[in-house]
Amino acid sequence: MILQTTTQQSALVTTIQVKEANLTVSEKFKTELFGLLDTGGKYIVVNFEQVTYVDSSFLGALVSALKHAITNKAEIVVAGLNKDILGLFQLIRLDKAFKIFDTIENAVADKAK
């Protein structure tokens, strides 16, 4: 299992359980995230706090999940990005596709608005 999921105020908080989010785990990540969406998850916070490295295949899986979420009228947001990963999101403009929050608490609070 790549994701550990908890519920906080009607938001599903999914914490990525690997330090290196790369090709070896991207398909499993995508499958697990799709599963959450297919079982009714409408607001999913993907927590990157434990992740120190991310590659293009993993980001591709995240974008694929976002497309699936939009089809299901759901939302995926990200939280807990370290400085380098945040810089990567900004460089490839993923900050325009995803809402990015410093903390899980801020992401969950945004859902409550």
Image: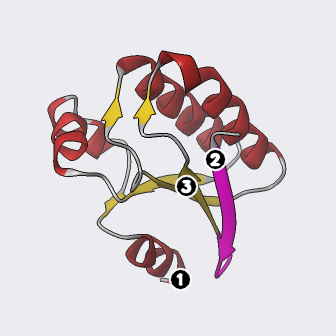
Dividing the image into 4 quarters, which one contains the N terminus?
top right
Q: Which residues are magenta?
A: 3-11
Q: Is residue 15 magenta?
A: no
Numbered tag placed on residue 3 in the rendering:
2
Q: Residue at x 63, y 40 (%)?
A: 2
Residue type at mark 3 is Thr
Give the foreground label among 1 and 3: 3
Secondary structure beneath disc 1?
helix
* Depicted 22 relative to depicted 75: above or below: above
Q: Is residue 1 left or right of residue 104?
A: right
* Depicted 71 relative to depicted 105: above or below: above
Q: CA distance from mark 1 to mark 3?
A: 20 Å
Give the color scheme: rainbow, by chain, secondary structure or one colour.
secondary structure
Q: CA distance from mark 2 to mark 1?
A: 23 Å
Are the residues flagged by discs 1 and 3 in contact, CB closer than 8 Å? no
> Residue beneath label 1, please?
112
Secondary structure beneath disc 3?
strand
Q: Picture coordinates of residue 74 (x, y %)?
A: 63, 53
Numbered tag placed on residue 15 in the rendering:
3
Secondary structure beneath disc 2?
strand
Q: In the depicted view, which residue is nearer to us: 45 or 99?
A: 45
Q: Residue at x 63, y 21 (%)?
A: 27
Are the residues flagged by discs 2 and 1 in contact, CB closer than 8 Å? no
